[in-house]
Image: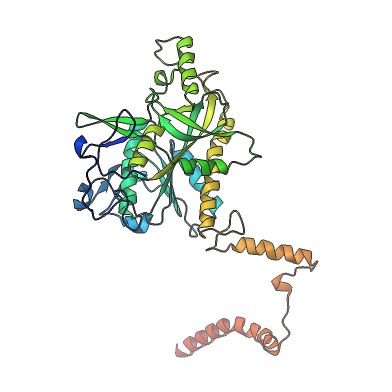
C-alpha cells in the first residue's frame, strides 16, 4: 500500500519512490509527528481520499453516477459494500449481478428486482447485490478513469472499509488460446513501462500501475483442476487503442508489416506479457494510488500470435466470458464464508433468509421416503365435538343473510 502523502508520484532511475513535496536534500530528515500515518485510510479502516478539497465541499456530486453526497444517503445505500466488480459492458455486469446474487444466496424483497442505480446518468450501469457492486466501466482508459474517480469517492462518502476492486474483462492472449483465464500480476503500457503517465496542469505525472500480488495468488488458488480451461498469471500490456496500438493488421490504417507486428508481440511475450487489453494500466494505477486492493481477471478471445480478428461464435464467446465470473464468484463466496457472512451448508444458501420452497421440497422428500400417502386438506376430517357442531351450524350461517333480507322486505311492506 502507498504510504507517501504526496499527490504526484514519480519514479527515479532506480525505481524508488521520490516524494515531490520534499527537496532531495531533505529526504532523510526526521518528519514531524502527524495526526495519522496512513494517508489513504482513517483509523477505522474506511477510505480516505488524497484530496483535502472534498472535505470542504457542502456536497459532492458524482455526476457520471447520478449520485450525490447531499442528495443521497450514501452510507445507508453503500456502507456494507466489500467488493466492487467492474467490466466493460452494461449487459455483462447485469449478468454478473444476477449470477453473484445466486452464488452468495442473496435474496431480494418479494416483488422487487435488480435496479440499475445509475440509469439516470445514461453513461454507466451499477447494480448492488448485498456486499457486491457490479459496475460497467466502458472501453478504454479515459472511461475507466472517470468511473474510478467517482467510485473511489463513493467509497469515501459511504465510509466503506477496506474495499476490494476487481476488473472482469476480455483480452487478446499472447501464446494462449481463446478461453484462457488470465490473472494480471502487473500492468504495463505499450512501451512496457509499469506506470501510467498523465498530464496534470501541463506537467507529466507518473503513477505506478501495481496490482495486489497476494490477491492474484489467492484467485489463482481457486482455479479448479477439473476446469476445462487454463488459468494463468502474468503481465498485462494495456493499450490506448484497439487496432494500431495493439499491432493489428486489420484496422482502417496500417503502416507496418506482419513481420513488424510479430517482432513486437514476441518482444512482449519475452518480457512476460501474456495478454493485451485497454483498461488495466489505469485500473491498477488509480487503485494503487488510493490504497485499494485490486485485481484484473480477463478471458482471452483469441491468440494474437495466430491472428487479429475474433472468429469464435457468439455462443462460445458468452461461455468464455463466464469463466472469469466463476473464478471471482468463488473468491467472493470463500471470503464471505470465512467472515461468517454466508451459510456454510450450501453453495447457494443464506444464513439470513429461509426458502419456503426448499423446506417444502425437503418435506415432500421425507414423506416419499416414509412411503406415506399424502392426503388433500379437504379430505382430512375432524371428529371433535366442536367440529361436529360447526358442521351442523354451517347451513344456518349460509342462510342467515337471506333470512335477514326477507325480514327487511316484510317490514317494508307492513310500513307501506
Q: Nearer the viewer, residue 142 or 32?
A: 32
Spot occupied by residue 133 in the image (x, y as percentages of width and height)? 43, 48
* Residue lying at 29% horizontally and 30% vertically, measured from the top left: 12
118 w.r.t. 362: above or below: above
75 w.r.t. 225: above or below: below
* Residue lying at 48% horizontally and 10% vertically, measured from the top left: 259
Spot occupied by residue 5 in the image (x, y as percentages of width and height)? 26, 44
Spot occupied by residue 332 in the image (x, y as percentages of width and height)? 51, 49
* Residue lying at 24% horizontally and 45% vertically, measured from the top left: 51
Q: Nearer the viewer, residue 366 or 140?
A: 140
Give left or right: position of 224 versus 89: right
179 w.r.t. 293: above or below: above
Residue 99 can be seen, yes or no:
no
Q: Residue furthest right?
A: 371
Give left or right: position of 201 versus 216: left
Query: Which corner quadrant holds the C terminus?
Result: bottom left
* Residue lying at 53% horizontally and 19% vertically, measured from the top left: 305
Spot occupied by residue 100 in the image (x, y as percentages of width and height)? 52, 48
Query: Which corner quadrant holds the N terminus?
Result: top left
Residue 340 can be seen, yes or no:
yes
Badge count: 0
Render colour scheme: rainbow
Amino acid at each position: 500500500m502507498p504510504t507517501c502523502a504526496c499527490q504526484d508520484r514519480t519514479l527515479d532511475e532506480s525505481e524508488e519512490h521520490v516524494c515531490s513535496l520534499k527537496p532531495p536534500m531533505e529526504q532523510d530528515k526526521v518528519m514531524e509527528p502527524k495526526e495519522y500515518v496512513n494517508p489513504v485510510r482513517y483509523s477505522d479502516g474506511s477510505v480516505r481520499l488524497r484530496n483535502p478539497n472534498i472535505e470542504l465541499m457542502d456536497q459532492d456530486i458524482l455526476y457520471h453516477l447520478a449520485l450525490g453526497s447531499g442528495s443521497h444517503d450514501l452510507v445507508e445505500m453503500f456502507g456494507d459494500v466489500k467488493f466492487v466488480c467492474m467490466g466493460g459492458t452494461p449487459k455483462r455486469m447485469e449478468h454478473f449481478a444476477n449470477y453473484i446474487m445466486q452464488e452468495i444466496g442473496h435474496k431480494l424483497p418479494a416483488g422487487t428486482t435488480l435496479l440499475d442505480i445509475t440509469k439516470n446518468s445514461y453513461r454507466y450501469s451499477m447494480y448492488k447485490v448485498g456486499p457486491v457492486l457490479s459496475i460497467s466501466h466502458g472501453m478504454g482508459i479515459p472511461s475507466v478513469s472517470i468511473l474510478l474517480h467517482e467510485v473511489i469517492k463513493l467509497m469515501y462518502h459511504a465510509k466503506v472499509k477496506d474495499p476490494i476492486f476487481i476488473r472482469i474483462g476480455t483480452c487478446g492472449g499472447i501464446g494462449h488460446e481463446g478461453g484462457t483465464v488470465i490473472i494480471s500480476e502487473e500492468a504495463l503500457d505499450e512501451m512496457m513501462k509499469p506506470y501510467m503517465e498523465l498530464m496534470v496542469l501541463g506537467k507529466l505525472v507518473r503513477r505506478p500501475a501495481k496490482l495486489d500480488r497476494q490477491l492474484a495468488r489467492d484467485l489463482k488458488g481457486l482455479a479448479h483442476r477439473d476446469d476445462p480451461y487454463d488459468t494463468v498469471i502474468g503481465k498485462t500490456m494495456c493499450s490506448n487503442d484497439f487496432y494500431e496500438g495493439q499491432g493489428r493488421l486489420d484496422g482502417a490504417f496500417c503502416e507496418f508489416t506482419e513481420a513488424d507486428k510479430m517482432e513486437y508481440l514476441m518482444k512482449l511475450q519475452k518480457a512476460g506479457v501474456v495478454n493485451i487489453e485497454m483498461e488495466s494500466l489505469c485500473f491498477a494505477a488509480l487503485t494503487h494510488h488510493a490504497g485499494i486492493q485490486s485485481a484484473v481477471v480477463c478471458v482471452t478471445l483469441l491468440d494474437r500470435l495466430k491472428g487479429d480478428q475474433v472468429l469464435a461464435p457468439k455462443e462460445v464467446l458468452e461461455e468464455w466470458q463466464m469463466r472469469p465470473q466463476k473464478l471471482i464468484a468463488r473468491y467472493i463466496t470463500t471470503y464471505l464464508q470465512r467472515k461468517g457472512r454466508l451459510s456454510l451448508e450450501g453453495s447457494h444458501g443464506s444464513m439470513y433468509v429461509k426458502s419456503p420452497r426448499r423446506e417444502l421440497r425437503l418435506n415432500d422428500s421425507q414423506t416419499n421416503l416414509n412411503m406415506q400417502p399424502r392426503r388433500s386438506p379437504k379430505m382430512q376430517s375432524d371428529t371433535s365435538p366442536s367440529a361436529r357442531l360447526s358442521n351442523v351450524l354451517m347451513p344456518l350461517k349460509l342462510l342467515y343473510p337471506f333470512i335477514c333480507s326477507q325480514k327487511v322486505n316484510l317490514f317494508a311492506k307492513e310500513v307501506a
